[in-house]
């Protein structure tokens, strides 16, 4: 079978590591030269000023990502800091250039940078953890790199292309007020995806290729199965009830004021843009996985997540600024889709290995949590940093978004998604190619 685009790009980048790294560093250096963006900087210098929190996000994100992916070496710390810093600088430069044609506010640029760092950290941790698993399985570094490219690399390509298509549709079909935000996040996601398929494999090959093997991953100190039997169903029931209550309240707030002096959220939202975003993400999932139940689960869960997030936002932020609902939908669904694609890849591989539905969910969630948990904490830390360094509406919005992201990751992606995705068992993951009846 012909290797996918992600595998070919990653393997080529690993084979030309020095040239790829040099090209990225030259690109970042050139874009930072005065006058590259025609003398115009997004938000009158909001992305370039020394007193902006955006300049410190990579410094916060990389060490936390490394510390959470225990056990990590100093070389991985170097890779994390360099990859996150280069992607952030490249995204900021591209946003400054695009802002010449599409008017963007400093808030739009800052939100897009938060999204790109979140997505980059997700891809980075997914690749690192998958590489460790491949090496632990007895594979040599070259074989491990190919395994990473065919799993974490394919997940990055699938999620990046799906999100890019949905954001492009929103920018074209949505309202004029929504186009700058969709365009900014689109540019940031494209930069992150290209870097994941080129810069990250090059850094892994050049920096992490060492005769000294990585230390083995220690066994988990405790497992979910060690808890009393009543804890798991109780936690699941509580999570579903909480999520359902938040989604119902969000639905009510979308179409009704809900309180004296409040206004329905639909007045501050582009309903067509939201529906377009949800629909294109669902269609992209259908095109990739060819299973209607998975595409339907993606559409429904993203819709529930958006409603629940809006409900929590309306409860936590009072009064709610007019720009907040649409910004929340974008910054919530874009990183969540990347995590969801990675989980679906895990679920598919475990199901095709012949596991039962129960074991499929358990193994996929356990293997994905080592990377996803670290990415979640990094994301929360960045939003907290933005909230604590901001003021007024931005401060309240950032702090509320941190709580919403935690609820979405734990309840929607790790609680509901695996159970819906394996609904019907092995039949949901039939192989499309190969001999008839092949699994």
Image (spheres, rainbow, N blue to C red):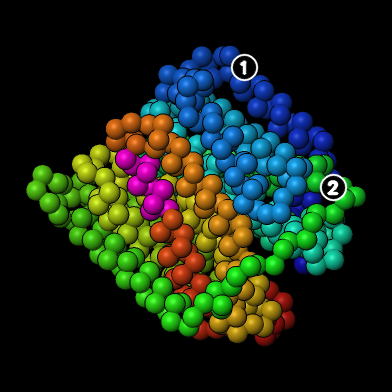
Query: Compared to 108, does 65 lie above or below?
Result: below
Query: Where are the magenta residues, as a range?
Result: 396-405
Helix, strand or loop under label 2: loop
Question: Which residue is tagged 1?
Answer: 33
Query: What x and y, as percent, mark residue 309?
Result: 34, 55
Q: Is residue 398 on the magenta stretch?
A: yes
Is residue 361 something that shows in the picture?
A: no
Image side of residue 267 versus residue 231, left or right: left
Q: Earlier in the sequence, mark 1 or mark 2?
A: 1
Q: Quick check: 400 left or right of 33?
A: left
Q: Is residue 207 visible?
A: yes
* Residue 7 relative to residue 427: left or right: right
Residue drawn at the location 34% of the way across and 36% of the way down = 395
Q: Quadrant of the N terminus?
A: bottom right
Q: Main secondary structure of the magenta part?
A: helix
Give 155 or 258, whichever is nearer the viewer. 258
- Looking at the rendered image, the quarter that the C terminus falls into is bottom right
Q: Which residue is mark 2?
A: 209
The question of residue 417 being in magenta is answered with: no
Q: Circle 1: is it few (<14), some (14-19), or many (20+) Cα within 10 Å?
A: few
Report the label total.
2
């Amino acid at each position: 079978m012909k290797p996918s685009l992600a595998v070919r790009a990653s393997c080529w980048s690993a084979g030309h590591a020095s040239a790829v790294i040099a090209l990225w560093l030259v690109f970042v250096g050139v874009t930072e030269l005065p006058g590259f963006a025609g003398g115009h900087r997004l938000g009158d210098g909001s992305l370039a000023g020394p007193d902006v929190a955006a300049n410190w996000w990579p410094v916060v994100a990389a060490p936390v990502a490394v510390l959470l992916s225990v056990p990590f070496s100093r070389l991985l710390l170097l890779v994390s800091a360099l990859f996150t810093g280069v992607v952030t600088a490249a995204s900021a430069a591209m946003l400054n250039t695009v802002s010449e044609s599409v008017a963007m506010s400093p808030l739009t640029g800052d939100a897009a940078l938060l999204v790109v760092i979140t997505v980059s950290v997700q891809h980075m941790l997914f690749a690192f953890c998958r590489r460790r698993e491949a090496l632990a399985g007895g594979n040599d570094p070259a074989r491990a790199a190919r395994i990473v490219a065919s799993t974490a690399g394919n997940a990055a390509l699938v999620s990046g292309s799906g999100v890019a298509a949905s954001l492009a549709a929103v920018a074209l079909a949505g309202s004029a007020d929504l186009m700058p935000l969709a365009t900014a996040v689109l540019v940031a996601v494209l930069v992150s995806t290209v870097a994941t398929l080129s810069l990250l494999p090059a850094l892994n090959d050049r920096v992490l290729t060492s005769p000294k093997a990585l230390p083995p991953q220690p066994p988990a100190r405790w497992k979910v199965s060690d808890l009393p039997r009543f804890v798991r169903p109780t936690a699941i029931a509580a999570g579903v009830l909480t999520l359902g209550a938040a989604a119902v309240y969000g639905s009510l707030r979308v179409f009704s004021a809900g309180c004296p002096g409040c206004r329905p959220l639909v007045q501050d939202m582009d309903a067509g843009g939201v529906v377009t975003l949800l629909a294109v993400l669902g269609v992209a999932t259908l095109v990739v996985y060819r299973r209607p139940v998975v595409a339907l689960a993606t559409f429904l869960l993203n819709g529930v997540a958006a409603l629940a997030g809006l409900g929590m936002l309306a409860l936590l932020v009072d009064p709610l600024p007019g720009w907040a609902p649409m910004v929340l939908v974008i910054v919530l669904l874009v990183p969540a889709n990347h995590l969801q694609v990675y989980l679906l890849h895990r679920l598919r591989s475990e199901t095709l290995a012949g596991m039962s539905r129960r074991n499929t969910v358990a193994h996929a969630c356990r293997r994905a949590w080592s990377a996803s948990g670290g990415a979640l904490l990094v994301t929360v830390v960045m939003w907290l940093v933005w909230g604590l360094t901001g003021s007024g509406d931005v401060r309240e919005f950032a702090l509320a978004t941190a709580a919403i992201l935690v609820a979405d990751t734990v309840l929607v992606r790790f609680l509901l998604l695996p159970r819906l995705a394996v609904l019907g068992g092995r039949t949901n993951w039939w192989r499309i190619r190969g001999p008839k009846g092949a699994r």
